[in-house]
Image: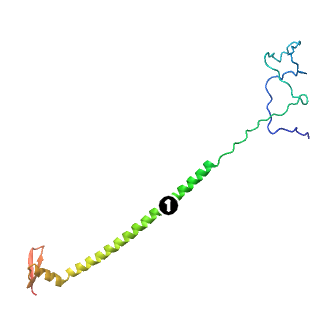
Amino acid sequence: MSAAPARHPRPIAPTPGPRPAVRPHRSSQPQRSSQPQRSGQPQRSGQPQRRAPQGAPGRRDHLRAVAAPEQARSLVPFAWTCALIIIGALTAVLFINTSMARGAYERRDLKIEIAALHEQKATLVTKLEQKSSPDELGADARGLGMLPADRFGFISLADTLVIESGSK
């Protein structure tokens, strides 16, 4: 079994294109190369050449992107949202409680009105029973000028006849 080489958590993609040549030292005057140009490397005039890192030859330091630090978020919008939710809930409870109290007062008033109407109905029924008694009916009839009948009779609507039964 062969051990696999250690891998970086995020592999870095190789840079496209050929690598620039390494200059051994830096001088104040730019040096012109007397060697003929290689076919794989284009001559770049006016652009500085890249230097290899100063560590081991052929080894590149691993570069990785660093995320920007997160900005501290303010708790003010969250606090306002919580406060508005609490105020809204308390307002809703107050509104419901007020409407229930108003309904309770209306219910009490209606019960009192129903009791008064029942009392009035009982009074009217009592008056009706008194007025429909035979003594009261006779007194009212005499007040209107009516006289008691000496004979009773029946009317036959089918024959349109008056049938007399006799005297009282």
Percent position of residue 160, x then y:
9, 73
Percent position of residue 132, x then y:
20, 80
27 to 5, vertically: above or below: above
- In which image quadrant can residue 41 be found? top right
Q: How is the image coloured?
A: rainbow
User: Is 8 positioned to the left or the right of 108 in the image?
Assistant: right
Secondary structure beneath dot 1 equals: helix
Q: Residue at x 42, y 65 (%)?
A: 103
Q: Is residue 112 visible?
A: yes
Percent position of residue 64, x then y:
79, 35
Residue carrying label 1? 94
Percent position of residue 154, x then y:
12, 79
Name the kind of residue labelled 1 in the image.
Leu
- In which image quadrant can residue 24 be found? top right
User: Is 82 positioned to the left or the right of 162 in the image?
Assistant: right
Q: Residue at x 78, y 16 (%)?
A: 46
